[in-house]
Image (cartoon, rainbow, N blue to C red):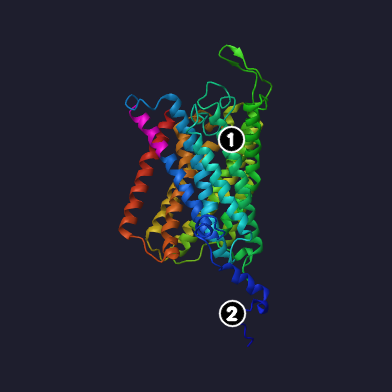
Amino acid sequence: MEHIAHDETSFVRPAEVGEMELYHAKTWLGKYVFSQDAKTIAIQYAATAIAIGMVALVLSWLMRLQLAWPNTFTFIDPAYYLQAVTMHGMIMVVYLLTALFLGGFGNYLIPLMVGARDMVFPWLNMISFWVYFTAVLLLAASFLVGGGSTGAGWTLYPPQAILPGTPGSEAGILLMLASLAVFIIGFTMGGLNYVVTILQARTRGMTLMRMPLTIWGIFVATILALFAFPALFVSAIMMSLDVLLGTSFFMPAIMTMGSEAEHVGGNPLLFQHLFWFFGHPEVYIVALPAFGIVSDLISIHARKNIFGYRMMVWAIVIIGALSFVVWAHHMYVSGMNPYFGFFFATTTLIIAVPTALKVYNWVLTLWQGNIHLNIPMLFSIAFLLFFINGGMTGLFLGNASVSMPLSDTLFVVAHFHMVMAVAPVMVVCGAIYHWYPKITGRMLNEHLGRLHFLLTFVGFNLCFAPQHWLGLNG
């Protein structure tokens, strides 16, 4: 056997030199702040996302207080309410859920589950987090500028987002748009890293059809984001030019305060198409990682292999592909050609087929399984219930003739919260209870965990289930 002295690295094989370099002494900043370790970066992503998510949670409480007691909390005036709605929606969808699933779970789980030593580009991985952190700071800064954050609604529709009468129409909207652009730049760095790591750094013997479904969900969601986010990036740049330079990409001929707007000739529908070309794939950018994680949780805690693994993989891929041809079902009331409405209603119903297939496979995995009703399994079953509820209401809203009278009602709010907020949050909680002991070596308290599940499950139902009835009543 060849003997190698500890101080003679000249005789060490090149592959082993790389291993040695991983474990050189690091400063506190290098280990915990500017770390290139995927696990540390994952924790940084998760902590930042949860911190800004708590801000959005407080904003939702303020909205509920205003709705429950309109004349009591006088500091929540109409302008502040619009700002709360806007910031709550954008933070929860983009800065919390997207960053948590892809930046948090993606960074932690991809190297471990595919057998890689780390991400392929560790330095780029570190930079992607700090760019995301900068985007969060820009977003938070909009609360502090004159006029406050933008109150254009979380979809940022023009011309409302640009006109002077809208809250935050000066610096607030610009900081929001700048934050989105920076977020997309940071995610593009991280997303390319995820894709290359999954395709090129898998361990020997792990073919694509042997990857855990968690990795499949993150992989396809990342590809969706790399194609969908550029549409939002372009629309953010164009709207910024409308605000700063007086261009008219999205400004139509419009009367404001009795006088015609200075710069006209644009088309606000162009922004809607660009936004929703990003917006509907964004639903699956959040949902697909949740699908993958819950598939593994159900399989593990039912002590049974997932039913129809290949079907589940192809369902994820097909859902991802179809998510790019359904965006205009968000725009039925915008004056769309009825033939286009028919097309998008049809594609919306088609995408429900692979989604329903996944639900059936989850149920069949549970069927005759050795089910352990521990906390991760409870959250997984709750995910199924919420997702089926939200999916059924989505079938109604996908039909143009039904969707139009329900637009701008609490029925829509209940639907997308069930699908996009409540169901993924159930998966996040279940995943934390499942992997926390594996990560830290410490078990979480079972009784507190069950209490957490009960309060979360009942609370979400009390909050969003009545909104279906309220929406149906106008």
Residue 284 shows up from this direction: no
Please name whichever residue, 209 or 115, is drawn nearer the observer in this view of the structure: 115
Mark nearer the N terminus (2 vs 1)? 2
> Dot 2: few (<14), some (14–19), or many (≥20) neighbours within 10 Å?
few
Residue 306 is left or right of residue 57, and the answer is: right
Q: How many marks?
A: 2
- What is the magenta range? 58-69
Residue 397 is left or right of residue 71, and the answer is: right
Q: Position of residue 105 (x, y in %)?
A: 51, 56
Which amino acid does the dot numbered 1 rest on? Leu
Kindly identify which residue carries mark 2: 6
Residue 177 image label:
1
Residue 340 image label:
none
In the rendered image, the residue lying farthest to the top is: 258
Which amino acid does the dot numbered 2 rest on? His
Mark 2 → mark 1, Cα distance in angstroms? 54 Å
For the N terminus, give its image quadrant: bottom right
Q: Is residue 171 magenta?
A: no
In the rendered image, the residue lying farthest to the front is: 7
At x 63%, y 74%, the residue is 16
Residue 37 shows up from this direction: yes
At x 67%, y 79%, the residue is 11
Nearer the observer, disc 2 or disc 1? 2
What main secondary structure does the magenta stretch of the protein show? helix
Q: Is residue 370 above or below residue 395?
A: below
Q: Is residue 361 above or below residue 406?
A: below
